[in-house]
Amino acid sequence: MTLYLLIRPLSKIVLFAFNLLTLGVIGILVDSTLIMMTMWLFPHAVQVKSFEWAILAALIINSVRAISGKLVRTR
């Protein structure tokens, strides 16, 4: 989780222009790569079978983050 919290904001800043051009696909790929890196660093804590499952996990994480962000901002 610490790896995610440290690297994700930096990657979002660096890849902002590409993220706009690809409509967010780069963000999903960055998150998927971070999930795979976390799996590599902590093999007993996080287990993902393939990169496709990491992409699915990134999509779920981003969807939950977007929905919860909208709910918090409206109140």
Image: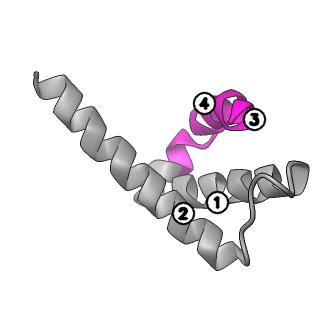
What distance separates the C-alpha of mark 4 from that of mark 2?
Answer: 18 Å
Tag shown at residue 57: 2
Instruction: Point out the stretch of residues depicted in magenta.
Output: 1-18
**N-terminal label among 1 and 4:** 4
- Cα distance in 3D space between marks 2 and 3: 16 Å
- Few, some or many residues within 10 Å of mark 1 (<14, 14–19, 20+): many
Of the residues shown, which amino acid type is indicated by label 4?
Pro
In reply to whether residue 49 is colored magenta, the answer given is no
Mark 3 nearby-residue class (10 Å; few <14, some 14–19, many ≥20): few
Q: Position of residue 74 (x, y in %)?
A: 11, 27
Reading the image, the residue beneath label 4 is: 9
Instruction: Please name which of the two marks, 4 or 2, marks the residue nearer to the observer.
Output: 2
- Between 32 and 14, the residue placed more toward the observer is 32
Helix, strand or loop at label 4? It is: helix
Q: Quadrant of the C terminus?
A: top left
Name the residue beneath numbered marker 1: 32
Displayed quadrant of residue 7: top right
Q: Judge depth for marks 3 and 4 and give the one in front.
A: 3
SS class of the residue under badge 2? helix
Cα–Cα gap, marks 3 and 4: 11 Å
Q: Residue type at mark 3: give it.
A: Leu
Mark nearer the N terminus (4 vs 2): 4
